[in-house]
């Protein structure tokens, strides 16, 4: 449904006018058009007809998934569908049925499933609720695209082609990152993204909440983080070195209740929300609120321009560790994710190298340069998270490599060496984004788990000229030079929607869609099954689904 139609509906609701049914004509797809492409799929004869009397039965532990399916199917069809317990006897059942059955432990991987559609019945079998949920997503894509309308649609033959599918993901980490720190978009925008991730079987939502340009999460112990840190007086526009400004303030943050709501909403769709709380750099908004946490202790403002910023947390001051640990304790109360992302990228080290406190720390701890200082900080935070039963994730600068020349600029050693006696905590997950893939391979050989989000292949803020759809689809999270025995350390990949130049939801949708569908298939489908021509054909129907939902994808890609 187009955004124009949505606006008309909203206006009619405001005027208390009755809504007419939205008429539509749709043809059942000639062949299944599922993204991401299942691992095994066989097309059978005939089709399943969804009817007003269709019964949805489920195992007790799949009730949430069955209710989700009933609600989704009911919106567009107008049918009053309900989830019911599986009957003891199937004999005598009349009409079409949909059954969600919990299979025996180990019959399928946790996210695997089998889907069989015949003229009289849909059967989804899985060993865990996540697998059943992904079976539902494949089923939804078998119906005409109007099934995703959020209002009743008339004149549609609600048929799904008969198929037999057995499926499971290639990777267990299939992520999308949304940057709310640069521009705050709000709860409904996040829910829209989660709905689209669910349809595409993505399972990790990196929620980027803090940076130099804004602090977007309520921390009750430190209220100035949002009273001051969530507001900036202006915003840069026109590019990295531009002097142009929007000429108006920008602000916004998520309350703790809103965070709980988005975590719950995501969990219902089998998506884990992984918060990103940036440290020790990208910290200007926090330091603007609490200047005593900065390395030089001077007042600063929330940044109105984008790019690397000078101010960093004072990693030689114990009160900074108390401050950050208290913040993370509140964050961990809100996010059940075992993984907590602490950023760690693009630290400008000049303040540290000029600080008497940091110099004293270096002498006391035997740290030979700023890379070692950052690793000292990183390991302390990693140990803190481990003490709470969590696991740290950070961008690959936490390994000590001088990706931006900032270590050399500050007069330090360019890379952390094992002889320094300061190695990164073994449990830290490396979110690889920058540098030669040989760095990612080295990290895997050293035993670190990796999420491969190489910027030149996965950054959604890049133009379609820089990362065309074909290039996004061709990305392989496993580096070509990584030996088989280390490949299990590659957990998967993620695509990143960085927000510096994405101030509106309209622009966010344009940059994200359709490339998000390519990344979903990269992470789910076995490489030998991938085919860009076939994907492009299936994408045509996916675009119709986005049209129905009013999503403004880039039309020529």
Image (tube, grey):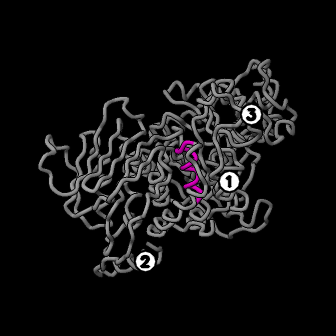
| Residue 148 is inside the magenta segment | no
Q: Quadrant of residue 426?
A: top right
Q: Which residues are magenta?
A: 513-526
Q: Which disc, if any, is residue 439?
A: 3
Which is nearer the eye, 533 or 521?
A: 533
The correct choice, above or below, for 374 with respect to 528 in the image is above
Q: Are marks 3 and 2 in contact (CB under 8 Å)?
A: no
Tell me how far mark 1 sits from mark 3, CA to CA. 21 Å
Q: Mark 1 or mark 2: which comes first in sequence?
A: 2
Disc 3 is placed on an element classified as helix
| Residue 518 is inside the magenta segment | yes
Q: Mark 1 or mark 3: which comes first in sequence?
A: 3
Query: Within 10 angstroms of label 2, few (less than 14), some, or many (20 or more) residues?
Result: few
Disc 1 is placed on an element classified as helix
Q: Residue furthest front?
A: 45
| Residue underneath mark 1 | 471
Q: Position of residue 103 (x, y in %)?
A: 31, 35
**Which of the two marks, 1 or 2, is nearer to us in this view?**
1
- State the residue at coordinates (74%, 53%): 307
Q: Is residue 10 left or right of residue 505?
A: left
- State the residue at coordinates (70%, 26%): 376
The correct choice, above or below, for 198 with respect to 427 in the image is below
- State the residue at coordinates (68%, 70%): 247
Q: Position of residue 111 (x, y in %)?
A: 43, 39
Q: Is residue 410 left or right of residue 423?
A: right
**Which of the two marks, 1 or 3, is nearer to us in this view?**
1
Q: Quadrant of residue 440?
A: top right
Which is nearer the eye, 307 or 462?
A: 462
Which is nearer the eye, 362 or 553?
A: 553
């Amino acid at each position: 449904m187009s955004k124009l139609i949505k606006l008309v509906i909203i206006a009619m609701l405001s005027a208390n006018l009755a809504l007419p049914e939205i008429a539509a004509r749709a043809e059942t797809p000639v062949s299944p058009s599922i993204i991401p492409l299942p691992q095994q799929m066989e097309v059978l004869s005939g089709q399943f007809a969804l009817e007003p009397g269709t019964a949805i039965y489920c195992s007790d532990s799949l009730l949430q998934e069955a209710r989700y399916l009933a609600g989704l199917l009911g919106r567009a069809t107008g049918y009053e569908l309900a989830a019911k317990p599986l009957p003891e006897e199937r004999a005598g059942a009349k009409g079409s049925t949909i059954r969600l059955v919990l299979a025996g432990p180990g019959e399928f991987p946790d996210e695997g499933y089998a889907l069989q559609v015949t003229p009289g019945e849909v059967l989804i079998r899985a060993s865990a609720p996540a697998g059943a949920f992904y079976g539902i997503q494949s089923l939804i894509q078998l119906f005409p695209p109007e099934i995703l309308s959020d209002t009743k649609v008339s004149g549609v033959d609600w048929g799904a082609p008969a198929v037999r599918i057995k499926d499971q993901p290639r990777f267990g980490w299939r992520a999308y990152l949304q940057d709310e720190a640069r521009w705050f978009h709000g709860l409904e925008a996040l829910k829209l993204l989660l709905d689209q991730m669910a349809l595409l079987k993505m399972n990790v939502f990196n929620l980027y909440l803090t940076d130099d340009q804004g602090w977007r999460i309520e921390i009750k112990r430190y209220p100035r983080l949002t009273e001051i840190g969530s507001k900036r007086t202006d915003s840069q526009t026109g590019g990295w070195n531009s002097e142009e400004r929007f000429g108006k303030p920008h602000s916004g943050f998520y309350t703790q209740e809103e965070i709980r709501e988005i975590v719950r909403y995501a969990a219902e769709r089998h998506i884990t929300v992984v918060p990103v709380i940036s440290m020790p750099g990208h910290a200007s908004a926090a330091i603007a609120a609490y200047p005593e946490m900065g390395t030089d202790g001077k007042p600063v403002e929330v940044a109105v321009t984008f790019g690397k910023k000078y101010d960093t947390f004072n990693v030689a001051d114990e009160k900074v560790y108390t401050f950050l640990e208290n913040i993370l304790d509140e964050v961990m109360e809100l996010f059940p994710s075992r993984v907590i992302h602490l950023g760690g990228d693009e630290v400008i080290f000049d303040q540290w190298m000029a600080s008497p406190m940091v110099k004293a720390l270096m002498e006391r701890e035997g740290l030979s340069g700023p890379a070692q200082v950052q690793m000292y900080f990183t390991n302390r935070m990693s140990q803190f998270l481990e003490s709470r039963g969590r696991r740290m994730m950070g961008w690959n600068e936490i390994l000590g490599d001088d990706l931006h020349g900032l270590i050399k600029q500050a007069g330090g050693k360019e890379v952390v060496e094992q002889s320094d006696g300061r190695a990164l905590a073994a449990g830290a997950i490396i979110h690889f984004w920058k540098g030669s893939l040989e760095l990612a391979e080295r990290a895997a050989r050293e035993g670190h788990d990796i999420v491969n989000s190489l910027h030149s292949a996965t950054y959604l803020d890049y133009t379609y000229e820089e990362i065309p759809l074909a290039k996004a689809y061709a990305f392989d999270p496993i580096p070509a030079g990584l030996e088989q025995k280390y490949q299990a350390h590659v957990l998967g990949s993620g695509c990143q929607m960085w927000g510096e130049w994405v101030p509106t939801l309209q622009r966010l949708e344009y940059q994200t869609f359709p490339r998000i569908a390519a990344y979903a298939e990269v992470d789910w489908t076995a490489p030998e099954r991938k085919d860009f021509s076939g994907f492009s054909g299936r994408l045509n129907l996916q675009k119709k689904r986005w049209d129905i939902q009013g999503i403004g994808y880039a039309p020529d890609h």
